[in-house]
Image (spheres, rainbow, N blue to C red):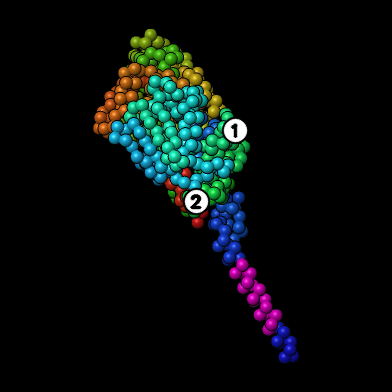
Amino acid sequence: MRNKKIWSFLLFFGLIMMLFLAACSSDEQGSEGNNEEGNNEEGTNEESGEPKVLIFGRGGDSVSLDPIAVTDGESFKVTQNVFETLVNFGEQDTTINPGLAKEWTVSDDGLTYTFMLEEGVKFHDGTDFNAEAVVANFDRWSSGTADKYYYYKSMFGGFGDEEGHVIESVTADDEFTVTFKLKRPQAPFLKNIAMSPFGMGSPTAFEAAGDAFGDEPVGTGPFKFVEWKRNDSITIEKFEDYWQEGFPKLDRVVFRAIPDNSARLNALLTGEIDLADGVNPSDGASIEGDAALQLFERPSMNVGYLGLTNTRPPFDNVLVRQAMNHAIDKQAIVDAFFEGRAEVAVNPMPPSISGYNDQIEGYDYDPERAKELLAEAGLPDGFEMELWAMPVPRPYMPDGMKVAEVMQKNLADVGITAEIVSFEWATYLEKARNGEADAFMLGWTGDNGDADNFLYVLLDGDNIGSNNYTYYDNEELHELLIAAQSEVDENTRNELYMQAQEIIHEDAPWVPLAHSTPLLAGKAELTGFTPHPTGSDKLHTVDFE
C-alpha cells in the first residue's frame, strides 16, 4: 500500500514537472519570436509562431513598381516601402529629415549640395549603397525622356544637356559623400529629392533589368519585393538586413486591389483585410462607432479637378473653359459625396500650401452665365463631348463615376451633351496624358508640400506630356513659376505664386472641384500607422497589439 502511494506521488509529481517544463519552453519560444496577436487570415498570433502579416486593401493596382516611371498613388503606396530617398519628410508633414543621407551642407549661393551618406546600408540584392549608387541612379534618370520618367522633368526641368535641366552634375567625392551642383538655385530642391519617385534603386538590378525593373524592384527599404499578381495583389516581406535596427515590425505586407469602396470596407469588417484606404465619407461615422475598428484621417493636401484638354476644340477657347466652370455645381458635389470632409476648390492647390491666393473668388455656379459665355464663343446651342470618369476611387474623389453623372446633368442644363467614358486605370492615365480626352477627371496629392509641386508640375508648359495633362501653356505663367523656383526668399516666392494663380484662374484650364480629407479604416489592434499627407505611407512602424 505504502509503495503504491509512493509511486502514485512520483507519477503525479512527474506529470506536474512535465507541464511546467512545457510551459517554460512555450514562453521561451514566444519571447524569441517577434510575432504578436492579430486577426487576419494569414495569422499574427504570438503563441502560434506565425508571421505578422498586414493585408492592406486599396482601390486599384499599381502601374509599375519602378517609382521614377509612375505618377500614381497606388504605385507609390508600395514603392515607398521598398525604396528609400536621400532625405525624408516628417512623420505627418513635409519638413526635411535625414534619410539615406545622415547630414548635408548647402553652399551660400544655393548651387552646391553635399550629402554624407549612411554607411553599411545594403540593397535587397546585396549590392552596397554608397555614393556611386546615388550617381548611378541620377545618371539613369537624367538620361531618360519625358514620356518615360515623368517626374524627373517635372521636378528638375529637363534631361541631360537640355537648357532647363536644373542639375548640372552629381559626383561621388568619396565612398559615402556625394555632391550635387545646380545650374541655378532651386528653392524646393531638398523637398524634391525626398519625393517617392526618387527612391534609390540597386544599380546592379536596374542595369540588368532595364525597362523590366518595375516588375522586380530592388531598393534599400524595410521591405523587399516578393510577388505581383496583376489586378489582385502585391506582396512584400521584411528585409532581414535592413539598416535601421528593430524595423520593420511586420513580417509581410500584402496590398490587395479591391476597386469598390463598399466591398473594401466589407472585407475589413469580415476580417479579410486589416487596413483599408478610400473609405467613403458616408461610412466615417459608423466606423468611429465600431469598437473593433479605428478611423484614420489623412492630413489634407490634395485637389480633385476636371481637366480640360486645352488643345482640343472647343476647349482651346477660354470662353468655353470659363463656361464649364460656371456650369458645374461644385458645392452640390462636395455636399453629396464628401459628407463634410472636403471643401470646394477655387485654385489648383489647397489652402494649406504656402503661397495660396485667398483673394481669388471662385467661379460661382451660374448656368445662365455659362450659356452666355458659350454664345460668345459661337456655340449658342452647346456641343457634344466625352467626359472621362476615373475607374477607381481616389483620395480626392471617392466615386468618380457618380460625380461624373452629376456633372453630366449640370452640362446638359446648359446645352452641352457629355458622354461618360472610362478605361482601366493605367490606360486611363496614359490616354489622358497623351491628350486624347476632351475632359477628364483627375486629381493630385501633393508630393512635397510646396506650391511648385502643384502649379509648375501640373500646369506649366514644360510638363506637357508628363504631369500637365491639359496641355495648357502660358509663357507669362512659365516665367513666374521659374522665378519662384529660383527665389530663396519665402515671401517673394509666395507673391509670385499668388500672381500665378490669378493667371490660371482667368485662363481656366481646369474646373477645380474639391480639396478632401481622405479617410482610412483599420482594425482596432493595429498600431503605429500614421497616414502621411503625401498619400505615400511608410509601414515600417506598423504592428499589431
Q: Residue 247 carries which label?
A: 2
Specify start and end residues of the magenta stretch as a single range: 9-25
Kindly give the residue lying farthest to the top in the view shown: 378
- Determine whether 440 is above or below 240 in the image: above
Image location of residue 520, percent across then percent down:
46, 43
Q: How crowded is mark 1: few (under 14 residues within 10 Å), some or many (20 or more)?
A: few
Residue 32 appears left or right of 15 = left
Question: In the rendered image, which quarter contains the N terminus?
Answer: bottom right
Disc nearest the viewer among 2 and 1: 1
Q: Choose top left, top right, bottom left or bottom right for residue 322.
A: top left
- In depth, the one of 62 and 289 nearer the eye is 62
Q: Is residue 291 magenta?
A: no
Mark 2 and mark 1: span between their CA atoms? 29 Å
- In depth, the one of 333 and 423 nearer the eye is 423
Q: Mark 1 points at which residue?
A: 208
Q: Which amino acid does label 1 sit on?
A: Ala
- Determine whether 504 is above or below 135 in the image: above
Q: Which of marks 2 and 1 is nearer the N terminus?
A: 1
Q: Residue at point 49% right, 25% down?
A: 144
Q: Is residue 19 magenta?
A: yes
Image location of residue 240, percent across then percent down:
56, 50
Q: What residue type is labelled 2?
A: Phe
Secondary structure beneath label 2? loop
Image location of residue 44, percent across then percent down:
57, 54
Image location of residue 483, percent across then percent down:
30, 25
Q: Residue at point 33% right, 37% down?
A: 106
